[in-house]
Every structure is written in C-alpha cells, then in structure tokens.
C-alpha cells in the first residue's frame, strides 16, 4: 500500500512540475517533426494504412494532452505532415488522463488512453483502424541494418524488456 501511495505522490509531483515547465516552441516543433517521420515510416510499411489515409487526404487531425497540441494533415500519398498552427482540425482527439504516470502505465499495458473525440466520424474510424492494426516491424528494420540473425536476437531482447515493463506497470 505504501508503494502505491508513493507512486501516486510521485505522479502528482510530476504533474505539478509538468504544469509549471513548458518545452520551448522550437523544441516542440523538432519533436513533432521527428514523430511525423516515425509515424510515416510505420504507416508506409502497411499499404492498407496508406490507402485508408489517402481517402482522407487534406483532412487535419489534432491530438491534445493538457496544453500540448499536435496537428497533422494527411497528404495525397496517405502519410502525415505537420499542419500549420492555424489549420482547422477535422478531428480532435483529446487525451483525458491528466496524470503522466497513469498515462504511461496505460500505454505500457497496450491500452488506449481515455479520450474525448470530436469531429469527422469516418476519419475517426480510419484513425482507430490504424491504431488497432498497424504495428512497427522492428525486426525487419533491424535486419536491414544488422542482418537477419542479429536482428532476431535484438528484437527478442527488446520484446522481453517491453514485456517486463508491461508486467511492472500492471502491478
């Protein structure tokens, strides 16, 4: 019981710190650009994903958590691009979990965070399909860099770490 109380206290302190601390805009933009590259890499490996997004080209998606906002526009290629700050979003996804530790625990367990969804229903359905069906093939990417055998061993190692983290988060 003391551990749970300590974790709750630590989460509350971290939340207070995050409310007082704000990353500089230039760093947020850089992080968003890197996130777009990773998302496009993963989406690009799944033809069904790019086809679904291609049907939604020009649509703008906003994901928010607390004061942080990410906005992407869907390109004609079925990928994502960071949207301009003044772009009007067709779909708003607001993550409701305020506590960072609680949010990380949910994500570590493979659960979707609780969120409020407003906007285009068909776009929301396509985004939900992406979340449910598209996964990063880490072993394939590693094999391009290190060869099949080394990639298999590295992927197995990373999967064990992820499993251990999920089990830890579930406690």
Image (tube, helix red, strand yellow):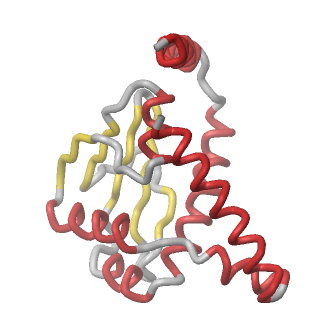
Drawn side of residue 73 relative to residue 151, left or right: left
Q: Is 55 or 132 nearer to us in this picture?
A: 132
Outermost front residue: 1
Quarter of the rendering containing residue 148: bottom right
- Looking at the image, residue 87 sits to the left or right of residue 44; the answer is left
Residue 139 image point, x, y percent: 67, 78
- Identified at 43% across, 57% down, the residue is 72
Is 121 or 103 nearer to us in this picture?
103
Q: Residue at x 52, y 81 (%)?
A: 44
Q: Which quadrant would residue 145 be assigned to in this image?
A: bottom right
Query: Where's residue 32, x and y in %?
Result: 58, 50
The residue sitting at 33% across, 74% down in the picture is 57
Taking 53 as reference, is 66 above or below it?
above
Give x and y (percent) for residue 40.
54, 71
Residue nearest the viewer, comparing 44 with 146: 146
- Residue nearest the observer in this picture, 7 or 98: 7
Q: Residue at x 35, y 50 (%)?
A: 112
Q: Tally the marks.
A: 0
Name the spot of residue 134 as percent of width and height, x first.
43, 73
Up-down: is 131 above or below 153?
Answer: above
């Amino acid at each position: 019981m003391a551990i749970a109380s300590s974790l709750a206290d630590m989460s509350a302190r971290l939340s207070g710190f995050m409310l007082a601390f704000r990353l500089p805009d230039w760093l947020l933009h850089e992080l968003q650009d890197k996130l777009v590259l990773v998302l496009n890499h993963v989406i690009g490996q799944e033809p069904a994903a790019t086809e679904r997004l291609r049907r939604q080209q020009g649509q703008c998606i906003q994901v928010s958590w607390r004061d942080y906002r990410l906005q992407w526009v869907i390109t004609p290629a079925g990928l994502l691009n960071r949207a301009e700050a003044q772009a009007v979003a067709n779909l708003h996804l607001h993550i409701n979990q305020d506590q960072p530790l609680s949010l990380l625990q949910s994500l570590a367990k493979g659960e979707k965070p609780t969120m409020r969804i407003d906007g285009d229903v068909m776009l929301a359905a396509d985004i939900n399909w992406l979340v449910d069906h598209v996964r990063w093939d880490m072993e394939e990417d590693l094999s391009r860099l290190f060869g099949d055998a080394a990639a298999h061993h590295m992927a197995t190692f990373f999967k064990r770490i992820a499993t251990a983290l999920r089990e830890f988060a579930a406690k």
